[in-house]
Amino acid sequence: MKKAIAARFNQAMTAAASLTGKRFGLLVASSLVATSAIVAAAATSSNGNGPLAALLGRSLAAETVPALTEPAPSPEPAAGSAGGSAQPEPSSASSSAESFTAPAPAPAPEPAPPSEPETPVPTTPEVPAPEAGRIKHVFMISLASPGYDAAFGSTPQMPYLAATLRPQGDLLSGYSVLDDSTLPNSVATISGQPPSAATKADCPDYGACVYSAETLTLVDQLGIAKFDWRAYMEEMVNPETGQPDNCVYPQPGAPETTVTGGYAPRLNPFVYFHSLLDLGDCASSDVPFTGLEKDLKKVDSTANFSYIAPNLCNSGVPAQCPAGAPDGAASADAFLAAWVPKILASPAYKKDGLLIVNFSQVNPPDPAAPAPAKPLKVGALLVSPFVTPGSTDGLAYDPYSLLRSTEDLFGLSHLAGADGAKVKSFAPALLGENNGD
């Protein structure tokens, strides 16, 4: 236990060391609130073993919050005392033997009644730690969709995806998104939280969109179960220095500022959860895209779960690329053609990997065209040594299914919307199980 505490303390200190200026002040202020909420929720858990209690034990936030006041000063020694200790008073008793009266003998103690055997305290059975199945490294690439037919049809706008990668994997032809905006789908994918009016608008007021510390995410679950994760964000830089930085998000009350074609917080769902912001996980695991290629070189440096978000241009959002460069779906396809071969060649993927090409946004339709009907079918693709190349799964899936399936791969429980009775999982086939949901 002491080693685990020391490890988490060192991790928290490393995360804190990466924060400067306003971001550090915001973290300190918000972490006090978040820690109090987690402590209260953990304390009211029926058996102390709920997910919030586990998160609290993992973060040790309550033990690392700095003292807000100085300790009270020690009382000064009384006047005339030496070294702070009082001198003993002289005895008033006479030294005469005649004046001494012997004390009366104390009555013999009564024998104590026989003790009853103690009732044993019931112990809570230890819950076995989650275990991953045969897939232990998941790579998820989040893109903007040009529509199902434009991505996977007979005359696709994404030829690498449709003609080169599709024959290697399993097409989820019934996969649909919850909304045409990015944030509702990516938030649901990592937490199971449903779309809201604010997330549908991609949260113009960042501070009003951050979920409370009690709202857990997939990566919280992974951390509790001792799996590691990374989120790789292309062109994520500190707005003050212009240098690559971890976990970049707007200040509360400030509008989102983005560079055309660059990083946008709405592409990064991990910065919208206090459970990750306040306890240091975002600061340590939500990193610039530049680290991906190095991490892919070894199994030990490749996270169990890697979330990959290109910038606005390379994710396929229209009108975000420089003039004359591929734009929209063509840019997203070029990104896949450049990076998917590196992922598929990595030791971790070859050993026990799964690549998910996922769409979290639907490009706006042509103004002259009618609005797309719901459900917004966009499709998704699974590539793995454990799928049948060129296969198709026509079941109805959505971002809740994506979360549930990922949880199933790592032996985790289901969060929020992923726990719905009608939510399907594609994990059983990947795990070699005969029956599914």
Image: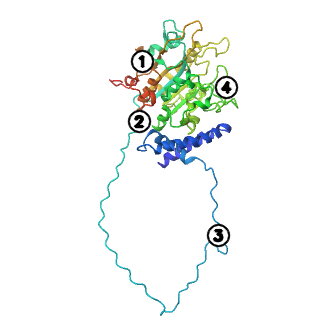
Q: Where does the image place residue 114, in percent across and percent down from the top left?
A: 29, 66
What whole-number distance in Å separates the C-alpha atoms at marks 3 and 2?
58 Å
* Disc nearer the start of the sequence (4/3): 3
Looking at the rendered structure, the kind of residue marked 4 is Thr
Disc 2, SS: loop
Q: Which of pointers 2 and 1 lies earlier in the amino acid sequence?
A: 2
Hey, what amino acid is under mark 2? Pro
Q: Residue furthest right?
A: 241
Q: Earlier in the sequence, mark 2 or mark 4?
A: 2
Q: Nearer the viewer, mark 3 or mark 2?
A: 3
Residue 366 location, x and y as percent? Answer: 58, 8
Q: Are marks 4 and 3 in contact (CB under 8 Å)?
A: no
- Closer-to-camera residue (102/129): 102
Q: Nearer the viewer, residue 65 or 282?
A: 65
Q: Residue 77's mark?
A: 3
Per the image, the residue denoted by label 1 is: 396
Which of the two discs, 4 and 1, labels the residue nearer the N terminus? 4
Can residue 346 be seen here? The reply is: no
Element on which disc 1 rests? loop
Residue under numbered circle 2: 130
Q: Which of pointers 1 and 3 lies earlier in the amino acid sequence?
A: 3
**In 3D space, how far apart are the residues under numbered discs 2 and 1 (Cα atoms)?**
27 Å
